[in-house]
Image: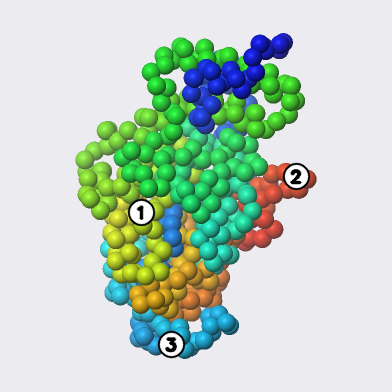
Amino acid sequence: MNGYLPISRRRMLARSGCGFASLALAGLATEESLHAANPLELRTPHFPARAKRVIFLFMHGGPSQVDTFDYKPRLQKEDGGNLPFKANPLLDTKSLRLLGSPWKFRQHGQSGTWVSELFPHVARHADELCFVHSLHTKGVSHGQAVCMLHTGTDSLVRPSVGAWVSYGLGTENRDLPGFVSITPPRGHGGPRNYGAAFLPAAYQATAVGHSGMKAANAKIAYLDSEGVAKQEQRRQLALLQAMNKDHLARAKQDEQIEGVIESYELAFRMQSEAPRVMDFSRESKATQELYGIGEKATDNFGRECLLARRFAEAGVRYIQVSFKQNGWDQHSNLYNGHAANSLAVDKPIAGLLSDLKQRGLLDDTLVLWGGEFGRTPIVQGKNGRDHNPSGFTMWMAGGGVKPGFHYGATDEYGYHAVRDRVHMHDLHATLLHLLGLDHKRLTYRYAGRDFRLTDVAGNVVRDILA
C-alpha cells in the first residue's frame, strides 16, 4: 500500500460500509500488530499503590451536604432565621434565611458517623467510609464545576481524570480499555468530562450509553459487527490498517492517526470481551437483589453499579458511574427531589460496597462518591437550595483510605469549608497518590510545556491515608 491509491482514503471508508469509522474502533489486525507497542500496556506506578482501580459514583447536580452527611445542629436550631454573616458581600444578610434539613440525622457504627435518613443502606457502611467535609472548588455554575471535577480546570479543554489514570497505569486487561464511563452526562461539558484532550486518543473513555438512557439498554456504540463474519472483519481491517499506516508514514508523526490505529485494534478485541463483562446472566439472583435490580426505584442505578463492579473485576482502571435522572439540582422542591434521588442510589451504592468487600476487591478498589459542588444552607425560593462551591462533602471507601474517618469541617451552618480545607486539585493529587502516581511527575508535554492533572497546584491529603 506504499504506492498510488486509486481512490482516496475518505471515499474508500465512505463506500466500504464496514462500520469501523464510528467505533473507538476495532482492531482487526495480524497477531504481529496486536503485539506491537500498546499505549494501554500495563505500567509500573511511581511507588507502591494502595489502590489498583477507581470507581467514581458521580452525583450530577450537586447533592446537599447539610441534608446527607454533614450534620449541623445549629442550622437545625436556627431554621428560619437569618444567616449571621455575609456569605456574599453583595447580598443583604437579612434576605438570607436559613433552611434546616427536613430529614433527621442519626449516628451510626463505632465511628458515630452522622448520616441523614436519606441514606439508611449506606449508613450501615459508616465504619468503612472516609469522609472529607471540607471540599471547595472553582466554578459556581454546573458547567464550570463539572469540568473542574472531571478535568482539573473549569474552562479549558484538558484530559479527564480517567484519561490521566489510563495514561499513567495502562490497563490490567489488554482486551478492555483502561477507562470506562457508564451513562456519562451529555451536558455541562459532555465528552470533555471523559475525553483525552491532547493525550493520545487511546486514553479517552469508552462510553457505555449516555445520560437519560436506561441502563438495561446502555451499550458500547458500534461494537456489534452486525452479522459480518470475523474472517471478513479481519480482511477488512487488514486493508484499513494498511491504509492508515500508509497515511501515518506519509505524515511521519501524527498522534491522532496512531490513536485511530490503536483504537481499531482494541475495539476488535473488545467485541468478544466487553459483551461477556456486560452480561449479567451469570450473576446470582441474590447478587442482583443486593443492588436493587428488579425494584422500580433502584433497578437503573443498580445495574450501573453492578456493571461497574464487573468492569473493575475485569481489569479496567477507572470506571465512572454517572447518576443523572432529574439530578441533584434542587433549586426548588428540595424534599421531593433529594428523596427520590437518594431512594434511587442508596441501596445500589450499599450493594456495591458489600459486593466489593465480600469478593476481596474493596481493599484495592477506591470508591469515590460526590457531586461537582454542594448546596447552600440558606433557602432559595420557598423550598430549595442554590449551588455552593465553598464547602461540601465527598466520601471514599477502600483503596487505602482510613475507614470510619472524618476529615475537615465546614462552619456551623455548613456554608464554607473552614478547617483542613481540601481543594479539587488536592482531591485529584490524593486520588493519583492512592494509585501509586505522583501528580507532579505524571506529566505530558504538549504545545511546548508539561501539563498535569493538578496544573501547578495540589497537595496529597495524607491524613486520610490508611
What secondary structure is marked by label 3?
A: loop
| Residue at (51, 24) in percent of width and height | 20
Label 1 to label 2, Cα distance in Å?
39 Å
Amino acid at pointer 2: Ala
In the rendered image, which quarter is residue 97 located in? bottom left
- In the picture, the disc for residue 325 is 1
Question: N-terminal of the two: label 1 or label 3?
Answer: 3
For residue 13, above or below residue 443 = above
Instruction: Please give left or right for residue 457 compared with residue 289 in the image.
Output: right
Instruction: Please give left or right for residue 59 compared with residue 430 in the image.
Output: left
What secondary structure is marked by label 2?
A: loop
Q: Position of residue 253 (x, y in %)?
A: 73, 29
What secondary structure is marked by label 1?
A: loop
| Residue at (46, 40) in percent of width and height | 207
- In the picture, the disc for residue 121 is none
For residue 295, above or below residue 124 = above
Question: N-terminal of the two: label 2 or label 3?
Answer: 3
Which residue carries the number 3 mark?
82
| Residue at (45, 71) in percent of width and height | 386
Amino acid at pointer 3: Asn
> Which one is nearer the viewer's eye here, 399 or 445?
445
For residue 288, above or below residue 114 = above
- In the picture, the disc for residue 447 is 2
> Which one is nearer the viewer's eye here, 120 or 254?
254
Instruction: Specify few, some or many for label 3: CA neighbours under 10 Å numbering under 14, 14-19, or 20 or more.
Output: some
Amino acid at pointer 1: Gln
